[in-house]
Image (tube, rainbow, N blue to C red):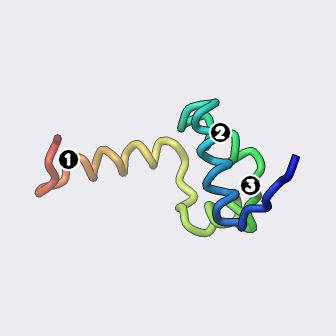
Amino acid sequence: MTTILMDPVELRRVGFEALVDSLGWVNAVRFLQQYESSRLNYTQERDQLLPSWDSETLVRKARERRNSPGKSSA
């Protein structure tokens, strides 16, 4: 049996197609996400970006925003 090595782009495309054929699109993506690591630190970024509100403050601010003039309720 002779094996022809594919270039990395083709290998990734054919491999993903095989996963999709076997698992379906959503589960193929979920499968790949198990093996992809991130260099980002979600916890650190979240702490830097989000305000340190308690749940009561969050609900109050959401209600204020929803009820503010010019906001649609759709």
Spot occupied by residue 62 in the image (x, y as percentages of width and height): 35, 47
* C-alpha distance separating marks 1 and 3: 41 Å
- Comes first in the chain, label 1 or label 3: 3
**Residue identified by numbered label 1:** 67
Residue 70 percent across, percent down from the top left: 11, 57
Q: Which residue is mark 3?
A: 36
What is the distance, in whole Å, between disc 3 and disc 2 at their CAs?
Answer: 15 Å
Q: Earlier in the sequence, mark 3 or mark 2?
A: 2
- Under tag 3, what secondary structure? loop
Residue that appears at 64% across and 50% down: 14
Q: Amino acid at mark 3?
A: Glu
| Disc 2: which residue | 19
Residue 20 to residue 70: above or below:
above
Q: Is residue 63 left or right of residue 50?
A: left
Which residue appears at 16% of the width and 53% of the height?
71
- x, y percent for residue 58: 45, 48
Location of residue 71 with respect to 28 vertically, above or below: below
Circle 1 or circle 3, nearest the eye: 3
> Which sits earlier in the primary sequence, circle 1 or circle 2?
2
Q: State left or right for residue 3 relative to residue 15.
A: right
Instruction: Classify 10 Å Cα crowding around label 3: few (below 14), some (14-19), many (20 and above).
Output: few
Q: Residues within 10 Å of mark 1 (few under 14, many from 20)?
A: few
